[in-house]
Image (cartoon, helix red, strand yellow):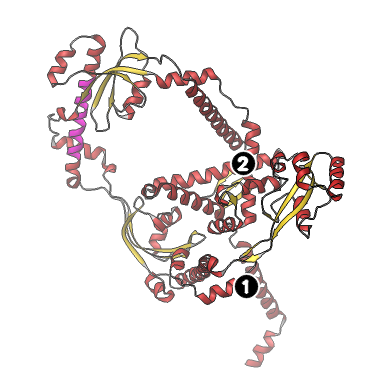
Amino acid sequence: MLEKLREGSQGPVAKIILGLVILSFALAGVGSYIASPSEQLAAEVNGESISRAEFDQAYQNERARLESQFGAAFNQLAADPGYMAQFRSNVLDRMIGERLLDQAAENYGLRVSDAQVKSQILGMQEFQVDGRFDNERYLAVLYRANLQPAQFRDMIRNDLTRRQLQQALLGSEFALPSEAELLVKLNQQTRDVRYVTVPVAQFANQEAPSEEDLLAYYEERKNTFRTEESVDVEYIVVDAEKIAASIEVSDEDIQQFYDANQLTYSQPEKRKVAHILLADEAKAEELLAKINQGEDFATLAAAESEDTFSGQEGGELDWFESGVMAPEFDTASFALVNKGDVSEIVKTEFGFHLIKLLDVQTSQAKPLDEVKEQISQRLQQEQAQDAFYEQAQRLAEVSFEIPDSLVDVASETGLEVETIKGLTRAGANGALGEPQVVNQLFNLDFIAEGLNSDAIQLSDNSSIVVRVMAHQASEVKPYEEVKAQINTALTQSRSTKAAQDYADSLIAALESGEGLDALLYEQELKLDSKFKVARDSQDFEPQVVRHLFMMAKPSEQKVASRITTMNGDQLVIQLTAVNEAESVDASETNQWLQQLSNVKTEASYQVLIDVLKSKAEIQNLL
């Protein structure tokens, strides 16, 4: 029997079958590579991608900026899913606009030099200590922002290129003094007004709604009395920041890192030089000859250098390290060996230089105590990142292997499972409030499966797995449950309608001049007046002041109107006079002139972005 099987396996039919099986496995393997997911994208702009990682970085940076600026006030806003959805949309929209500007700048052939990028970075206050650029602070700030120096330089270059484009296209915007003067006059304008406040509470004695009225209201608006869809959720979050907080870095690890990275924690060699700058090479040769013959360098610098600022100090410049100055100047300065040595003529984009070495600060390592905390934080972050990747991968694997219980997954991975009941879309916040998580939790197919989700990446440093334990669909509340609510709404509606009708009768009386006193007496109300109400007046609510300044200048017949106040009362107002400013302050006009120019520039910038968008192929993939 076995012999026949062995012979059969060597026959041509078996070999063909075996070949097909091998081919199917090979194609399946190739297919898995072809079908493997590519990098997640947030958007595509004219075929150029904005990756999800780029978006997440921009989102986190903008969120951190607002949190540091507004603190608890921003955290309250962040609890609103609608606000955060709009916030995310605004971040992506800004990134799309920047990408369009980058593409336009490239089409126009705009470029920014390395020297301009360097100058911009050296001038940034964030990297300065005691008014001077500090390389250690520069690297520390970039590290905290999770940026590499090359990456940051590219960001600065892109920003400068965009500014160059904006200056070229929008730099011609201006405002006329007459426009600014008109704005000042409008801003200083005041208005006189007569008004009557009509409290809605005075009209609360309307006929009570009948049972039929309440039922009819309920039947017409059933869908407004629905419970909110909710889910009971189990979830496990892996977060690098939480991991980092639990990591203690040993002194031994710090010492080993310090020893292995001496160059990182060394103060680079610095040099102090004096220079003479000239526009003419022949003049430079003449001065070099005088210096070689023994004439004083500082005296010649004061008399001849076209860098008049340093010339007053004998040509002396501040201390600098390699890579700060123009490349040719930098190379020549660090090629000088002994104090007092003078270079040959050095040509840069600024002209011709003669350089004298004044002093040298050799490279030296910083004491461990000075950088210990910095090293500890770095090692903590690195260890946390490694642990995060390991835990996130383990969570993804185990939640797939045990698909019907996060409790068992937590037991296998050593992670903590958290539970929340009655979670609604509006009430979701934190990790559960991220759009991709909310969409997963309220996906009916996912709910029906009752299984663990795939690992959902929240950011570069955070991942979550969720599972819906129970689902409560939205349903219409019973009439008896909302009857009191309907009664209150109907009663309030009738009171408001009566107050509005009464206010409209007051408007008619004010405009005609007849019957006003009788109407006021009927409700025991009075007609008040305010004079010279300004745009920043505190006499009325802001929306009332805005309404007042939108009313047309009164003619012979003074028109009145009605507006609802914040507490629901009706306010009848009649504009009686418009008071123009008698004179205009020139300094205020100049301030408005600059503001008006800025407003026009911003408006033109938005038009530019809109035009670029209208001509672009944009795909929002969030």
> Which is more toward the observer, 484 or 571?
571
Task: Say whether residue 525 is left or right of residue 349.
Answer: left
Give x and y (percent) for residue 381.
51, 66
Task: Say whether residue 327 is left or right of residue 268.
Answer: right
Task: Check the image and name the residue furthest to the top.
Answer: 556
Q: Which residue is mark 2?
A: 100
Task: Say whether residue 143 is left or right of residue 272.
Answer: left
Magenta segment = 486-503
> Which is more toward the observer, 371 or 589?
371
Q: Which mark is residue 260?
A: 1
> Which is more toward the observer, 382 or 367?
367
Task: Say whether residue 25 is left or right of residue 226.
Answer: right
Amino acid tagged 1: Ala
Amino acid tagged 2: Leu
Label 2 sits on a secondary structure element that is helix
Task: Tell me, yes or no, whether the highlighted magenta stretch contains residue 495.
Answer: yes
Give x and y (percent) for residue 386.
53, 70
Task: Tell me, yes or no, whether the highlighted magenta stretch contains residue 50.
Answer: no
Distance between mark 2 and mark 1 Cα atoms: 44 Å
Q: Quadrant of residue 22?
A: bottom right
Dominant secondary-structure state across the stretch colored magenta = helix
Label 1 sits on a secondary structure element that is helix
Q: Can residue 444 be seen by looking at this rendering? A: no
